[in-house]
Amino acid sequence: MSEATIFIDGEAGTTGLQIRERLEHRSDIRLISIDPDKRKDADERRRLLDAADVAILCLPDDAAREAVALIENPETRVIDASTAFRVAEGWTYGFAEMTPLQAGAIAGAKRVSNPGCYPQGFIATVRPLVEAGLLPADAPLTVNAISGYSGGGRKMIEDYEAAEDPAPYLPYGLALKHKHLPEMRAYGRIDHEPVFQPAVGAFAQGMVTTVPLQLWALPGDVTAKRIHEVLAERYDGEAFLSVAPFEAVDRVQALDPRSYNGTNRMRIHVFGNEARRQALLVACYDNLGKGASGAAVQNLNLMLGREPTLGLVMAA
Ligand SMILES: NC(=O)C1=CN([C@@H]2O[C@H](COP(=O)(O)OP(=O)(O)OC[C@H]3O[C@@H](n4cnc5c(N)ncnc54)[C@H](OP(=O)(O)O)[C@@H]3O)[C@@H](O)[C@H]2O)C=CC1
Ligand SMILES: CC(=O)N[C@@H](CCC(=O)OP(=O)(O)O)C(=O)O
């Protein structure tokens, strides 16, 4: 197996560090690093970007745009963890399980945009239902979600860890214009952006997204059980995504947002009340794992033609 040269631009940040941890022991990869004093030096970054087979960008959006513009080597492939290119033309969305064809598209792509953490849970639960005709594309959808504070990067981590009594639950995104809305709409295959109500919790890492559905308002006779069947069938055999048996939570801890921390796993649950004709679609995963660094390594494996699970923790 030939060794691939990988440069992580932003390797000292939250996402970059976690990707580094997942790659540094691998014999099929040669990691090249920037001198910490030069990490914002454009010439040095260009040199390393051009030397890489794959550059993984773990930067704020503007710095990610700048990094892409710096690249001169036409052979350098890119995985960008930021929001900058998620709905941009010429970029492949790096959510491998999104459709049966997506992993193949990522494998052949030059530019891959890692998905946002929250959108993955939303897209994973909603898109198969739109494609199966259970949810009309113009359905008015809502997504409620909670993330650990590491989702806000180094600054939020420092703030939470310095706080004496941080709020256990803090809703935000109240202006309803969160940066994840365009990708939720585009890849959820829906006509309208959902009402997205995220919250940050006083725990470091882990995430739950919830999409409530008023089944009585949908055309046809959609049941929660049918929704569960469609999702279970869609993700059957996937290494990283599983669908729990219908309503199979007997302890509330099963939906602890931290339950998949350190792994690249996502677990989907469907709950329903058939009499009221309501359902809940829930996804539980690690915002820094499947939500960020794990997905980036999964995409890298696909791009390099490696075993998809290489270097990724599978069990919680
Ligand atoms: N945290 C999360 O859960 C997730 C994050 N992401 C995305 O990943 C990206 C990185 O986020 P995260 O790791 O959390 O952020 P951090 O703030 O933890 O890390 C960002 C890193 O980029 C460095 N940096 C900033 N500007 C430049 C520049 N101009 N040139 C070179 N390096 C620079 C920072 O250095 P310094 O601190 O010295 O400025 C820091 O090391 C973001 O776009 C975010 O949206 C994606 C999914 C989930
Ligand atoms: C808790 C928190 O602040 N989370 C971030 C989302 C994580 C992030 O910025 O990264 P991605 O867009 O790449 O997923 C936010 O809501 O802006």
Image: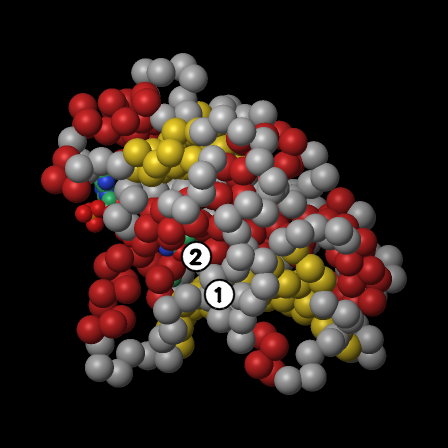
Which residue is denoted by mark 1 in the rendering?
261
Mark 2 CB in 8 Å range of ligand 1? yes
Q: How many labels were placed on the picture?
A: 2
Front residue of 177 and 106 = 106
Front residue of 178 and 24 = 24
Q: Is residue 188 visible?
A: yes
Q: Is residue 62 visible?
A: no
Front residue of 132 and 99 = 99
- Give the structural element (helix, strand or loop) at label 2: loop
- Percent coordinates x, y for residue 180 in the rendering: 46, 49
Examine the rendered structure and indicate whether residue 203 appears above or below residue 15: below
Cα distance between the residues tagged 2 and 1: 8 Å
Front residue of 121 and 250 = 250
Q: Residue at x 58, y 25 (%)?
A: 108
The amino acid marked with disc number 2 is Leu
Q: Residue at x 48, y 65 (%)?
A: 261
Which residue is denoted by mark 2 in the rendering?
288
Compared across the picture, whether 154 is left or right of 280 comes to left
Q: Residue furthest left?
A: 37
Which picture quadrant has residue 169? bottom left
- Percent coordinates x, y for residue 237 in the rendering: 75, 51
